[in-house]
Amino acid sequence: MNARLLVRSLVAAVFSGATKTSSSKIVDTSVLIDGRIAEIAEAGFIEGPLLIPQFVLRELQQVADSADGSKRIRGRRGLDILLRLQKMPQLTVRILEEDFPNIREVDLKLLELAKDYRCKVMTNDFNLNKVAQVRGVEVLNINALANAVRPVVLPGEVMRVAILRDGKEPGQGVAYLEDGTMVVVENGRKMVSRTVDVTVTSVLQTDAGKMIFGRYDDRIRVVREAAGA
C-alpha cells in the first residue's frame, strides 16, 4: 500500500468530538516513526486516547513520499505503526482536524494543541522536549522511559559483551548491550569480533542516553577459564 492510500485509510478512522482531558496524549511524528509506542501500548502501559493531529499525518505522508529512500522507509513505518495502533481494541486513537494556520512550525502547533486539550505530548524529539518545558507543556519521552527501565550497572561489575568495532581513542573497543546501550571498552581494540568479559569502570548518563565504560583485562579470562566458567 502506498503512502497516500495509507493516509486515506487512517483518515477514514477520524473520531469527532475528542474529549479535552489530561488523560489524552498528543503523539508527535518522531514517536510514530520510532515505533516502540506500539509495543508499549500492547503491554498496557498507555492509558487514555491517543490524539493524532492532521498536520502530523501530513508530515508523515511527506516523509513517506520523500525521494530519499531512507526517509521514505521511515515515513511508511510511521504510517504502518499508526494503522497498528488503530487496530488495537484496548486503545482509542483519534485524528484531530484542529490546526493553527498562523503557526508554521509543527512543533509549535503541537504545543498549542496540547495546551488547548490540557494534555501531554508524546515525543522523542530532544528540541521539542526542551521547548515544551519552557512553555509549561508536559512531555512523555519514550527515550526517557527506555533509559529508566534499563538494568542498573555499577562500577566493579563484570559483564560479557561482544566487541564490534574500534573506539575513538587508542586501544578502545566498542560494544552494545541488547537494549542499544553503548559500552566503551579500554584495551578492547585487540578483541574486536570477539566476546569478552569486561569490568565496568564508570557509567555516564546523558540526555541522549546512558554510556558504560569498562576495561578488558585478559587476567579475568584466564581466571574464569581456570574456574571452568
Image (cartoon, rainbow, N blue to C red):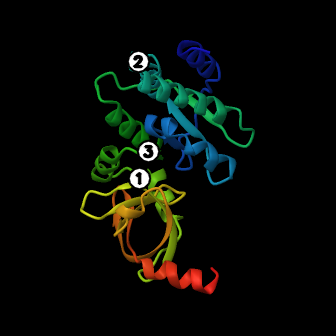
Disc 1 vs disc 3: which is toward the camera? 3
- Amino acid residing under circle 3: Thr
Res. 138 mark: 1
Eyeballing the image, is 134 above or below 108? Answer: below
Depth check, front residue: 33 or 217: 217
Q: Which mark is residue 66?
A: 2
Q: Amino acid at mark 2?
A: Ser
User: Does label 1 or label 3 sit earlier along the sequence?
Assistant: 3
**Residue linked to disc 3:** 123
- Amino acid under label 1? Glu
The answer to whether residue 49 is left or right of residue 204 is right
Question: Is residue 4 at all visible to an observer of this figure?
Answer: yes
Q: Nearer the viewer, mark 2 or mark 1?
A: 2
Label 2 vs label 1: CA separation? 31 Å
Q: Are the two marked residues, 1 and 3, in contact with CB atoms closer than 8 angstroms?
A: no
x and y, in percent, of residue 32 in the image: 51, 36
Helix, strand or loop under label 1: loop
Q: CA distance from mark 1 to mark 3?
A: 11 Å
Q: Quadrant of the C terminus?
A: bottom right
Residue closest to the eye, 211 or 195: 195
**Eyeballing the image, is 164 above or below 92?**
below
**In the rendered image of this protein, does residue 103 appear above or below residue 121?**
above
Q: Tell me residue 100's x, y (percent).
A: 35, 26
Q: Is residue 47 visible?
A: no
What is the distance, in whole Å, between disc 2 and disc 3 at their CAs? 22 Å
Tell me which residue sits at (49%, 68%) in the image. 196
Q: Are marks 2 and 1 in contact (CB under 8 Å)?
A: no
Residue occupying the point 43% across, 77% down: 218
SS assignment at label 3 = loop
